[in-house]
Amino acid sequence: MENVIIIGSGCAGMSAAIYTARGGLSPLVIEGLQPGGQITTTSEVENFPGFPDGIDGFGLVWNMRTQAEKFGAKILNAVVESVDFSSETKKIFCSGNQVFEAKKIIIATGASARLTGAKNEKELFGGKGVSTCATCDGAFYRGKDVVVVGGGDSACEEAVFLTRFANSVKLIHRRGELRASKIMADRLLKNEKIAPVWDSVVKEVLVGDDGKCAGILVENVKDNSVSKIDCQGVFVAIGHKPNTDVFKGKIDMDEEGYIIPAQNSLVRTNVENVFVAGDCSDKHFRQAITASAMGAMAGIEVSR
């Protein structure tokens, strides 16, 4: 019987591990499909406090892991396949026919950004020109030409934010009008640095001689014509999917699959002694620092 099991090993999970381990609970951390979480795909993190020269995403989460292990956290490379939260003792069923029991659970499984599926997109994701976070990576594109893919509020916010740094911003949208709220759409359309490209989808991200993004090929969905847009950055803003499928029917979620915190709490859930932290619950900020903060809060709650 474990005191606490933490499901997920990104910033939220490792922050929770540090706090619970330091509290003497010897947590078991189940890494999941992507050990270290989404941030491991980020080549440089400049906005995490304490690193004035920046740090790569893998290095950041590895430091957190080392710190958690120093205090007695146990790290298991496995994937959670199902859970049973119906009784006081929580059961976690993992790959390899492994079953674990715990008094308390922290869910920190994160969320995955949706990509377009364009050729070379995955290969250039994370430091080579394709990103899903303007707040994280926008400053790297100062004076450069970038595109944003999407047509909702998030895409508009990303595009407007990027005008602080980029020389130009083109918004690629598969429809002839934005899906965003009127206020966000108006803000984007009035910005002289943003040029919409309507009725179009990205077919390919072009790779330059330096192995980074050199442009994109877009296809018009009405006449199937293909054109090239020169750019050094592609920001995909077509939504995120929380990694919570395994918890469906076991815990309160919204229609998108994000775990809903209990009333008057950021990290408690509707199931007693089951807590949540990070991007599997937070759909607004999605930052390493906010995920870490939620992990700390969950760790403190569990340790009480």
Image (tube, rainbow, N blue to C red):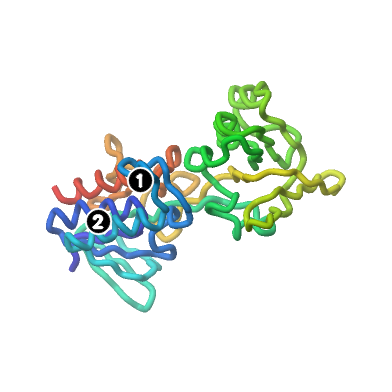
Q: Is residue 65 left or right of residue 171?
A: left
Q: Is any part of residue 150 visible from this angle?
A: no
Residue 17 in which image quadrant:
bottom left
Q: Is residue 34 left or right of residue 215?
A: left
Residue in view at x 36 percent, y 70 percent: 78
Give how far apart the Cα atoms at labels 1 and 2 are. Answer: 13 Å
The secondary structure type at the circle numbered 2 is helix
Q: Position of residue 86 (x, y in %)?
A: 28, 60
Q: Quadrant of the N terminus?
A: bottom left
Residue in view at x 84 percent, y 44 percent: 222
Residue 61 in which image quadrant:
bottom left
Sequence-earlier tag: 1 or 2: 2
- How many C-alpha atoms fall within 10 Å of the one at disc 1: few (<14), some, or many (≥20)? many
- Give above or below for 80 relative to 106: below
Q: Position of residue 26 (x, y in %)?
A: 17, 62
Q: Mark 2 highlights which residue?
A: 17
Check disc 2 and give the amino acid type: Ala
Check disc 1 and give the amino acid type: Ala
* Nearer the observer, 66 or 181: 66
* Nearer the observer, 163 or 78: 163
Q: Position of residue 137 (x, y in %)?
A: 51, 42
Residue 137 is marked as: none
Residue at the farthest bottom position? 96
Residue 291 is marked as: 1
Q: Is any part of residue 50 visible from this angle?
A: yes
Q: Is residue 300 left or right of residue 9?
A: left
- Give above or below for 293 relative to 72: above
Q: Position of residue 148 (x, y in %)?
A: 63, 40
Residue 25 in which image quadrant:
bottom left
* Nearer the observer, 255 or 22: 22
Number of numbered labels in the structure image? 2
